[in-house]
Image (spheres, rainbow, N blue to C red):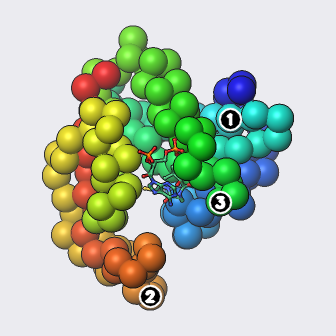
Amino acid sequence: MIIQQIHSNKKQHLDLLLLADESEEMIDKYLHKGDLFALYDGDLKSVCVVTSIDNQTCELKNIATHPQYQGKGYGSALIKYVSELYKNKYKYMLVGTGEVPSILAFYESFGFKESHRIKNFFTDNYPHPMFEGDIQLVDMIYLKKNL
Ligand SMILES: CC(C)(COP(=O)(O)OP(=O)(O)OC[C@H]1O[C@@H](n2cnc3c(N)ncnc32)[C@H](O)[C@@H]1OP(=O)(O)O)[C@@H](O)C(=O)NCCC(=O)NCCS
């Protein structure tokens, strides 16, 4: 398994990034200034994007694994990799997500804890109702991890 930072043509991975964030417009707002990482195990399995918020805090903006390879540890490997990589530069890592128990549990297993929420983020910012399985996304929950 190898993890590489991608410096050029970051939109080559748009298909994967859209799994975690269905709005290309939103992705365009952070992809150019963010650090994009790709995990390969043979072929490409997962990507993630980390941006800088201020000199203490970075944010995991997007993480996605190809659907047929989910649940095999690739997403966890990426989170561990970026947590190690950024711990000398930042004190905290933030991640924002909808209120989906399986995804909240995924982040909490790496030490992320709920920090704050933006009420009605998904209903206010997307042109149609957003669902993850049966769960409608309403508030954005921010979780924070001490690096
Ligand atoms: C969330 C995601 C990035 C996890 O990546 P992954 O490679 O499947 O992660 P891992 O295999 O390391 O870990 C999977 C863990 O996440 C949990 N999980 C959360 N959502 C999941 C999903 N849709 N599919 C599989 N596992 C999921 C599982 O419970 C599993 O926990 P376990 O190891 O205790 O069984 C991946 O499922 C994905 O790409 N989902 C769609 C995009 C998305 O929702 N991104 C997050 C936006 S906030």
Of the numbered discs 1 and 2, the one sitting upstream in the chain is 1
Q: Which mark is residue 128?
A: 2
- Residue 82 visible somewhere in the drawing: no
Q: Which residue is mark 1?
A: 39
Q: Nearer the viewer, mark 3 or mark 2?
A: 3
Q: Earlier in the sequence, mark 1 or mark 3?
A: 1
Is 80 situated left or right of 25 in this image? left
Q: Amino acid at mark 2?
A: His
Judge: label 3 CB < 8 Å from ligand 1.
yes
Query: On screen, 9 above or below 87?
Result: below
Residue that carries the numbered disc 3 in the rendered image: 67
**Placement of 119 over or under 96, stated as above or below:** below
Residue shown at the point (71%, 44%) measured from the top left: 45
Tell whether 124 sits left or right of 132: left
The crowding category of the residue bearing disc 2, from other C-alpha atoms within 10 Å (few below 14, some 14 to 19, many at least 20), is few
Residue 58 quadrant: top left
Q: Which mark is residue 71?
A: none
Compared to residue 55, the image places residue 99 above or below, namely below
Q: Nearer the viewer, residue 43 or 123?
A: 43
Horizontal and vertical percent position of residue 105: 31, 50
Q: Quick one: which residue is furthest to the top in this view? A: 88
Name which residue type carries label 3.
Pro
Say left or right for 105 vs 19: left
Distance from the alpha carbon under mark 3 to that under mark 2: 23 Å
Q: Secondary structure at mark 1?
A: strand
Mark 1 surroundings: few (<14), some (14-19) or many (≥20) residues within 10 A? many
Q: Secondary structure at mark 2?
A: loop
Q: Position of residue 103 (x, y in %)?
A: 38, 55
- Inter-mark Cα distance, 1 to 3: 14 Å
What's the residue type where badge 1 is placed? Leu
Local packing at callout 3 (Cα closer than 10 Å; few below 14, some 14-19, many 20+) is: few
- For label 2, being within 8 Å of ligand 1 is answered no
